[in-house]
Image: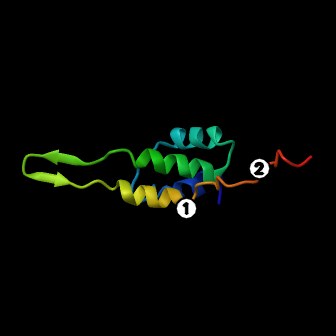
Amino acid sequence: MTPLEQLKENLREAAYPFFTDAQLTALLADAEEDVDAASYRGLLIKAEADEVNFPGLTMGSSRPYWLSLARLYRTSQTGSMERRDVR
């Protein structure tokens, strides 16, 4: 599977199309070809407010769904710190 195909799979593009191939390629390029980083960024974009309200019709937001998927690809923010009191 190519990185572009994997990114499409991670972003659920078959069921919920949102990005063009050019946009997906740009996401990959911005993430230095790291599919997980590109997936995280793409899912955050999909999580932007998407609730629809018309008189007599309200479609709820799918933001929690996209954010839960994004958590799968978020890099760990933990790491070690150098101690300053020991040389």
Instruction: Tell me the distance, in whole angstroms, between the alpha carbons under discs 1 and 2.
Output: 25 Å
Drawn side of residue 77 relative to residue 8, left or right: right
Task: Tell us which disc is closer to us: 1 or 2.
Answer: 2
Residue 1, compared with residue 23, is above or below; it is below
Q: Position of residue 24 (x, y in %)?
A: 54, 44
Identify the element where label 2 is drawn.
loop
Work out which quarter of the rendered image holds the N terminus and state it: bottom right
User: Any mark on residue 23, and which?
Assistant: none
Disc number for residue 81: 2
Q: Earlier in the sequence, mark 1 or mark 2?
A: 1
Residue pushed farthest front?
A: 85
Residue at 57% x, 53% y is 7
Q: Is residue 52 left or right of residue 20?
A: left
Which residue in the protein does label 1 denote? 72
Name the kind of residue labelled 1 in the image.
Leu
Residue 18 visible somewhere in the drawing: no
Instruction: Identify the residue at horizontal 67%, vertical 55% (top origin).
Output: 78
Q: Is residue 76 above or below residue 28?
A: below
Residue 37 seen from this side: yes
- The amino acid on which the numbered mark 2 sits, given as a three-letter code, is Met
Residue visible at 82% across and 44% down in the picture: 84
Residue nearer the viewer, 62 or 35? 62
